[in-house]
Image (cartoon, coloured by chain):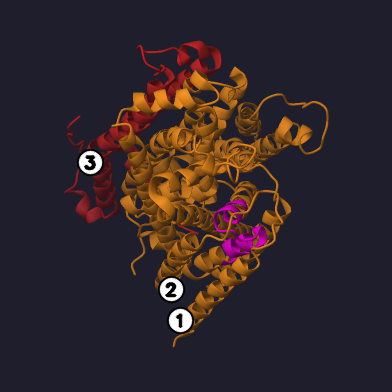
Amino acid sequence: MTKTTRIFSYLAAAFALLALAGSALAAPDLGQATKQATNWTAISMFAIFVLLTLFITKWAAKRTRSASDFYTAGGGITGFQNGLAIAGDFMSAASFLGISAAVFLDGFDGLIYAIGFLVGWPVLTFLMAERLRNLGRFTFADVAAYRFAQKPVRLFAASGTLVVVLFYLIAQMVGAGQLIKLLFGLDYWIAVVLVGILMMVYVLFGGMTATTWVQIIKAVMLLAGTTFMAFSVLSMFNFSPEALFAKAVEVHAKGDAIMGPGTFIKDPISGISFGMALMFGTAGLPHILMRFFTVPSAKEARKSVLWATTWIGYFYVLVFIIGFGAIVLVGTNPAFKDAAGKLLGGNNMAAVHLAKAVGGDIFLGFISAVAFATILAVVAGLTLSGASAVSHDLYATVIKKGQTAPGSELRVSKITTIALGIVAVLLGIVFQSVNVAFMVSLAFAIAASANFPVLFMSVLWKGCTTRGATVGGFLGLITAVGLTVVSKSVWVDVFHNKAAIFPYTSPALFSMTVGFLGVWLFSVTDKGPRAAIDKAGFEAQEVRSETGIGAAGATAH
Amino acid sequence: METKLEADLVQVVKNDPNYQKLVRTRSRYGWLLALAVMIVYYGFTALNAWDKAFMASKIGSGVMSWGVPLGLFVILFTVAVTAIYVRRANREFDALTDAIHKNAAAAAQPVAAEAHVTQPIKVRA
């Protein structure tokens, strides 16, 4: 037995034990959300998924030797595979359960929410995707710092990455804990620890190859499951959307109001600001940007975004149908409600209950397993991108100034993976009661205000300098976080002040402006010797970003 | 660290008419389509913020409101516009990029450079 094989058999055994311990401990109800009876179908289906992914990780571990294998799967993922993996990264449990719940509650408002998440993709395709692939190798900092002084810009890029990754991680961890308590009947902390351990295993042993395949499998499972649900719902109405909507209007407490915009967009400024966070945040999410370096060329990068956009768009149409299906089939069925008439397990469970309504217990188990697998895949991608920022940007470039011994960078990323795993578990337990959707939209707002302006200006504007990128980026980052703290979600709901200082839902309109203005102002006033070097470097950067001449290709295995 | 491009190779590529055509056409096309997406999306958002009554109004005699098909249109438009860009890029921009690569490779080897004079290529629009 080889060393890796032994490690994996231990892990499989440990996982089985944890699952057993979890179900044994599942009796007392400790959390604030109602816990369901232990669901053995769901647990077995999920166990099968985990065993499959561990097997893939073992296979991937054999192919993960160099830093390039670890960060980008050697750059050998095809456009189609990467498209599915991006979709897998992006269609989080918050999307699936959160948006279907929004449609279940408010109808049309849920569609507005879903569309926001989709519209960033074409903009990313037209303006960034190919250029990113041509300039970068492992992290988006490779692109942002291409012609600048490495230390300050990478310091900023790593900070931007870690802040976004941490907020996103907290959201996923809390989501996982709540979900598993509800779906599997396991305790919150067990769920969070399980997610933490599995994600560490995928990333540590299998790097980007394992992470990519976990995301692909999960994307296929999620798309298949939601297709079946939407098809079943529509077939009950002879494939007439009008009949489905008519029935939904008839049975919904809000009646006809579910067919038009409600309170989701409170005022025009909040609407535009939130829209900007979602649209431009997509182009600033480090774990998404990193996926562009896993394909061999700009052409494949472009293909992968088209596949991703297609799958994600299709998925949101399905989720809209699923939400309406839940109004009709779940909302009217007392079996899914408690004594007070509330949905069992909360509104986020609308899609899960619908799974039972259309496909019985086995399908319910399948969808529950898919929901957990979804979180696992997203969390693995986030961790990998956080670990790369620390090892590739902070350690190798800022601390060691590019003079790292072979293998030491990889060792640092593995240590960081473990550290991030532990931090994510702890934060997941500390922030148990945080609003998941809020954390996700905050991560998008920060990505749009800090990472996106720097990336955009450094690639497209000749006049951008080291000082402009660094100062502007940090200003955008601080403004986005600062405005969030003084907005209602934190200032009133967490700190219990009377009124919010910042009246709008999302800071993006203002913080993105600050980010862009900051990059511009601190660049045009920069007359130092470094500024001259920065501007002189634009020509060569432009030629490479447009043509890919000199860009790294796939490494041979 | 990766090596930066040689200064004279940069000039060779910049002087290649294919390169100038690629950069000009692709960036104009990219911005145009990006603008179209923004108009469609922020138009949709603005209607939801300012004219809620219109979005909720009925198309026919049934319950179907204007908002639902408009929302689905935004989704379809997003996917379609991405496909349109990728289609043109696969046909036209990739051909230009290949030509630029060939010319650059020829310039990098002075002996062969004679045979590969920098020539603009014809591309089906």
Circle 1: residue type: Thr
Q: From this view, report whether residue A403 is shown above or below residue B57.
A: below
* Residue A5 tag number: 1
Q: From this view, report whether residue A393 is shown above or below residue A207.
A: above
Question: From the viewer's perspective, is the residue at label 2 or at label 3 nearer?
Answer: 2
Image coordinates of residue A434 in percent, x first then y, are 69, 45
In the picture, measured across the screen, residue A133 lies left or right of residue A32, that is left
Circle 3: residue type: Ala
The chain that appears red in the image is B
Q: Are marks 2 and 1 in contact (CB under 8 Å)?
A: yes
**Observer-nearest residue: B5 or B87?**
B87
Q: Are marks 1 and 3 in contact (CB under 8 Å)?
A: no
Residue B87: name its quadrant. Answer: top left
Magenta stretch: dominant secondary structure: helix
The quarter in which the C terminus of chain A is drawn is bottom left
In the picture, measured across the screen, residue A82 lies left or right of residue A96, that is left
Whether residue A196 is in magenta: the answer is yes
